Image (cartoon, rainbow, N blue to C red):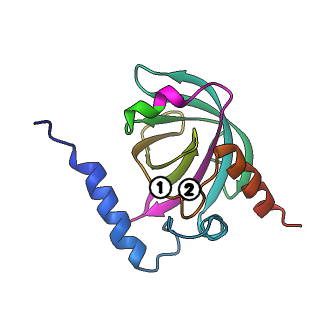
Amino acid sequence: MRLLHPAPLLLAVALLVLSAATAPALININLPIAKIYESVKAVAVASVVSVNPENRVIELKTSEQLKGAPVGETFRVQIAAPAELIAKIATGQPLVIMVGEDLGKPVALIHVADTWLLAEALPAATTPAWRVLQAHDAKRSFSGTTAELVKVLAGLKSPK
């Protein structure tokens, strides 16, 4: 029997417990996408520059900062779980990252390859980096593709 690392489970439990309380910096992932956009500290759209399937790391270049402080001109995301997702990610694909806080630590809701993910920041990294801990079912917030999400968020940035 393979034992799982407790960190992802602890993060998931923490997110569930904390989402019940009103914490303005926490990303409440059960809200409509417009409310998530309002509640997070930063939102950026990036493009996949390279994919390393061996260590499941994608290199990204920010194409547009929609809200808040820059996430970095370039940054990395490691897809620790779900491991099979790396096969669906290709150079040139868009990625959306929404940054908030959980217990004072940066966390992110990421959408790439039409999949919602929960990630934690890797503060010791020389290039800004995030580690995805798990996929997340946020289809109640937005069930479309990543490209469609980019268009929706651009509309939220500059409402007509």
Q: From the viewer's perspective, is 151 left or right of 73?
A: right
Disc count in the image?
Answer: 2
Looking at the rendered structure, which numbered label has been put on residue 42?
A: none
- SS class of the residue under badge 2? strand
Residue at x 47% of width, y 55% of height: 106
- SS class of the residue under badge 1? strand
The first of marks 2 and 1 along the sequence is 2
> Residue 51 occupies which quadrant of the picture?
top right
Query: Is residue 2 found inside the magenta-colored segment of the image?
Result: no
Residue at x 63% of width, y 71% of height: 35
Looking at the rendered structure, which numbered label has been put on residue 106?
A: 1
Residue 84 vs residue 59, the one in the foreground:
84
> Residue 84 occupies which quadrant of the picture?
top left
Q: Which residue lies under the disc numbered 2?
A: 99
Q: From the viewer's perspective, is 134 left or right of 113?
A: left
Residue 64: x and y, percent?
Answer: 75, 45
Mark 2 crowdedness (10 Å alpha carbons): few <14, some 14-19, many ≥20: many
Q: Marks 2 and 1: CB-CB under 8 Å?
A: yes
Query: Is residue 92 found inside the magenta-colored segment of the image?
Result: yes
Query: Given the image, on which type of amino acid does mark 1 rest?
Result: Pro
Residue 83: x and y, percent?
Answer: 38, 33
Residue 74: x and y, percent?
Answer: 63, 34
92 is higher (above) or lower (below) than 38 = above
What segment is highlighted magenta in the picture?
86-106
6 is higher (above) or lower (below) than 89 = below
